[in-house]
Amino acid sequence: MTDTPEFVGKVALVTGAASGIGAATAQAFAYAGASVVLCDTNPEVETMALSMAETGLHTTAVIGDTSNANDCAAMVEHALSQYGRLDFSFNNAGIGSRMRPIDQIDENSWQRMVSINLTGVFLCMREQIPAMTASGGGVIVNNSSVLGLRAIPETSLEYTAAKHGVIGLTRQAALNHAQDNIRCVAVCPGFIETPLTTPGTSIDIDEESQRWFVERTPLGRPGQPEDIADTVMMLCSERSRFVTGVSLLVDGGFSGT
Ligand code: NAI
């Protein structure tokens, strides 16, 4: 046995790293020994990367928007110029929205949702896959949702549609790039306590709907960002070397109810 952290010498890129699930996952990669590029539209991501680096972790930041092709290219370019390779990507950046009847969903809101929650994942993968191929292979984990696999009453139509799209994108890329030694998987979180799901945010969740989720979660508690981060570590690990194309529910049993 050795005490060397599992991902020493590896390079990871995390989008949406300034908050919630992305922040926890960036931290988990860094604690596991990887060099980590934290990406977010929120400039706060720079302060986070800097304070992690001050504790001896290998972290840098890129401010960028995953729905912008040039920004996605810059994120991957940064990983290559700083660290010389790319092994893991967690395409996690995303937004929520409130449920509205279909005749009240204007094209701009639809486009915004699809361009961040679906096209953004494609734009990131389009840059990451050649970089990983040049590095000898890698693992891409895309953050979908339980709403990528099913619908839930009173939930945003455009969010559910975009998250279903992430599953299809992941599945097909897994087949198309298996020969490049790249594994592509999706995680499908249930209710996770983050700024996104805090009452008063864009998805308009209230305490009653939080209770609704927790009551239907057999493990009896809301998820935490670290629950997803640990799953991403497991999927990137060599222990998952024969796993690709899957969409893994991480929802405390919610979807089985
Ligand atoms: P969060 O709101 O705490 O964090 C999202 C981060 O993504 C923020 O830092 C935000 O600035 C960043 N971001 C948003 N749009 C971006 C863009 N275009 N480019 C770069 N960065 C951008 O949210 P949370 O809960 O951590 O969500 C992360 C992902 O997990 C999202 O894709 C969300 O849909 C998904 N998810 C969350 C669940 C939950 O219950 N919290 C459940 C299932 C999926």
Image: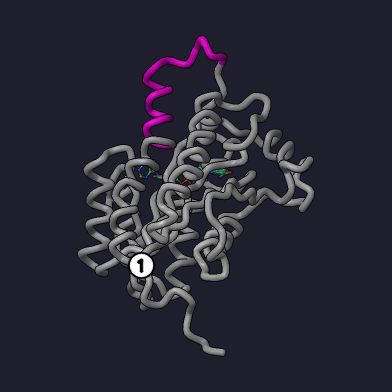
Rendered residue at 39%/56% (across/down): 14
Look at the image and tell me whether residue 58 can be seen: yes
Q: Amino acid at mark 1?
A: Val
Q: Is mark 1 within 8 Å of ligand 1?
A: no
Residue receiving disc 1: 11
Give neighbour class at mark 1: few <14, some 14-19, many 20+ (Cα, 10 Å). many
**Given the current orientation, which residue lies at the most extreme front position?**
179
Residue 165, how many percent across, how many down?
A: 49, 34
Rendered residue at 50%/12% (across/down): 104
**Given the current orientation, which residue lies at the most extreme top position?**
103
- The residue range painted magenta reads 101-117
Vertical side of 185 occupied by 53: above or below? below
Query: 196 or 9: which is nearer to us?
Result: 9
Rendered residue at 57%/50% (across/down): 246
Residue 224, how many percent across, how many down?
A: 61, 55
Vertical side of 106 occupied by 133: above or below? below
Look at the image and tell me whether residue 201 can be seen: no
Quadrant, the N terminus: bottom right
On screen, residue 163 versus residue 216, left or right, reads left
Rendered residue at 53%/14% (across/down): 102
SS of the residue under disc 1:
strand
Residue 228, how many percent across, how many down?
A: 57, 56
Q: Does residue 107 belong to the magenta stretch?
A: yes
Based on the displayed image, in which of its 4 quarters is residue 29 positioned? bottom left
Vertical side of 12 occupied by 218: above or below? above
Quadrant, the C terminus: top right
Residue 20, how many percent across, how many down?
A: 50, 51
Main SS class of the magenta portion in the image = helix
How many numbered markers are drawn?
1
On screen, residue 103 versus residue 56, left or right, reads right
On screen, residue 216 versus residue 196, left or right, reads right
Q: Does residue 104 belong to the magenta stretch?
A: yes
